[in-house]
Amino acid sequence: MTDLSMPHTETRTQSATGKIALRWLLYVLLGLFALYYLMPLFVMLTTSLKSLEEIRTGSLISLPREVSFDAWKTAWSGACTGIQCEGLRPYFWNSVLIAVPAVAISTLLGALNGYVVAQWRFKGANIIFSLMLFGCFIPFQVVLLPMARLLGMMGIAGTIPGLIFVHVIYGLGFTTLFFRNYYVTIPAELTKAARVDGAGFLRIFWSIFLPLSLPIIVVTVIWQFTQIWNDFLFGVSFSQAGTQPVTVALNNIVNSTTGVKEYNVDMAAAIIAGLPTLLVYVVAGKYFIRGLTAGSVKG
Amino acid sequence: MSEWLENHLPKVVLAPSFIAVLIFVYGFIGWTAWVSLTRSKLLPKYEIKGFIQYERLFDSPRWDTAINNLYIFGALFIVIAMVLGLLLAILLDQKIRVEGAIRTIYLYPMALSMIVTGTAWKWILNPGLGIESMVQGWGFTNFEFDWLVNPDYAIYTIVIAAIWQSSGFVMALFLAGLRSVDGEIIKAAQVDGIPTWRIYTAIIIPSMAPIFLSAFIVLAHLAIKSFDLVIALTGGGPGYATDLPATYMYAMAFSRGDIGQAASSAMIMMLVVFAIVVPYLYSELRAKND
């Protein structure tokens, strides 16, 4: 008996140490990957706090010897985007002026559309929804040329209202999809019962559906805000000097060829441009991920 | 009148959005398709001349480079992001204590603009002061890493940055998939003494086939539309070594003043996207209606 059990306990302890080693390996691997994802942010941050002299002589990943916020000041209010040297500030506000109304309008329309498609099914509603859904997936290159002409004809080419218009139009597919998928889970009996009680289309939406919608409103607002804030293609195609969003201005600062290349200013500008969406992600990451996966994972 | 309105209000509410989509999506696609069949240069012309723009496109060495780059970039980006995403998801699925924090770290690049990502990696990969000079500073004076400015390798820097940006997202997709696998089956397999890696390869991963498809669709879609990252990281250069269809289209439309070429390249992009997305959406919609 003992002869038989001895090797058995030995393998048991071996597998126990094996398990602990494996556990360690797991955490080391996860830690290394975390470093990989954090490294660019770390490099951006430290570079933005160094002087140009230190950047030239020091190493990419070394901490700044002397912390200086000069680069941040220049990036915000002095860096050159071509001929103008006002920093990112005016363009940052352009992005705010574009994003806030565009997010609000496209979310509201998405809620109404989703409500109709999910709860007031009429003949053809599904086809309409499918057609709108396909619109989410087109590469926007295919609408750039006619949109540029249309904005010109409407007299809003190169203006902020023009960019708001574009973002609302091409955000509708996604916002409708989000609300539709949320509202189909609400039993149709609820609408029926409310109608029996004499409530109309808008009243049911306002008093029953909207109060239930907070989670999906948060998801949609975050999704739209991230999309619009981070947009570059529409921003670069449909803006002119003075109305560019922050992403376009950042790219202009980085690629501006006048004077000495100020890497610390580039990095500070990049962080400033990325900060709003990063903050949203840190504060409401759960909803951000839900938006990202909404279209791609069923159920 | 008011009763008619009440009965038709759902349609009235949906109509503006639907009409907008009809015009600004389908109408505009039609416009672009039409113009791609004309001799439009700086200004659009509407007289149809056949497929000359497409002939010019396929004869153009620059477009050739853009398509080749799309193959290289797309294949590497999709495969590596999926493998890395799956690996991270499996690692994170082992009852990790600080899972929430780690997930947050892996996924944050997805919240950033591609322009921010491109700016960061442009600095990191900068041969003079970035990784190359850092490793040389460690004593490896022969170390060379000049991919960013090397026409033969610059496209791989876009792969590097794109994977950094998107692999966390793929991880989140796969993690959700891993969590949705029926726990009973896994428990039964564990009771039978089947080793963990076999449980993954034989039970869990095969049951996630729909998620692989979703991830593939999303990544392929991202790859074809890639524009900002190229602009921020390499500007399409050196020369046009890192051009992708999206940057080719943009250059033709807004700096070369060649609307015919811009329209035809946009149409090709759209056909590629549709070839990938339409069968997927069709099956999704059918599955939902069943």
Image (spheres, rainbow, N blue to C red):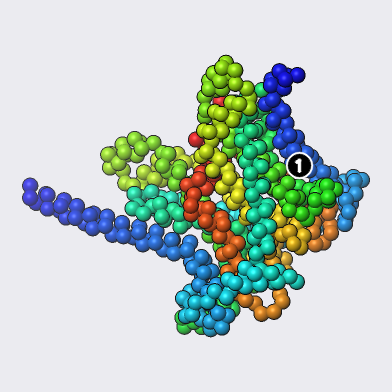
Label 1 marks a residue whose chain is B
Name the residue at the right extreme: B47
Identify the element where label 1 is drawn: helix
Instruction: Give the percent coordinates (x, y) of residue B53.
Output: 84, 52
Asked whether residue A136 is in view, the answer is no
Is residue A84 depicted above or below B49 in this figure?
below
Q: Nearer the viewer, residue B277 or A82?
A: A82
Name the residue at the top extreme: A196
Quarter of the image holding residue B205? top left
Which amino acid lies under the numbered mark 1 shown in the image of this protein?
A: Phe
Residue at image location 31% in from the left, 56% down from the top: A23
The residue pinned by badge 1 equals B24
Residue at image location 63% in from the left, 44% down from the top: A104
Is residue A134 depicted above or below B268 in this figure?
above
Residue at image location 39% in from the left, 36% down from the top: B182
Is residue A83 depicted above or below B274 in this figure?
below
Determine whether, in the image, residue A142 is placed left or right of residue A180. Answer: right
Name the residue at the left extreme: A2
Residue at image location 58% in from the left, 38% down from the top: A178
Instruction: Give the percent coordinates (x, y) of residue B101.
Output: 41, 55
Determine whether, in the image, residue B114 is placed left or right of residue B64. Answer: left
Determine whether, in the image, residue B43 is placed left or right of residue B152. Answer: right
Q: Nearer the viewer, residue A275 or B265?
A: A275
Is residue A155 depicted above or below B133 in this figure?
above
Instruction: Give the percent coordinates (x, y) of residue A160.
Output: 73, 53
Q: Could you classify mark 1 by the number of other residues whose Cα lies within 10 Å: few (under 14), some (14-19), or many (20 or more)?
A: many
Asked whether residue A152 is in view, the answer is yes
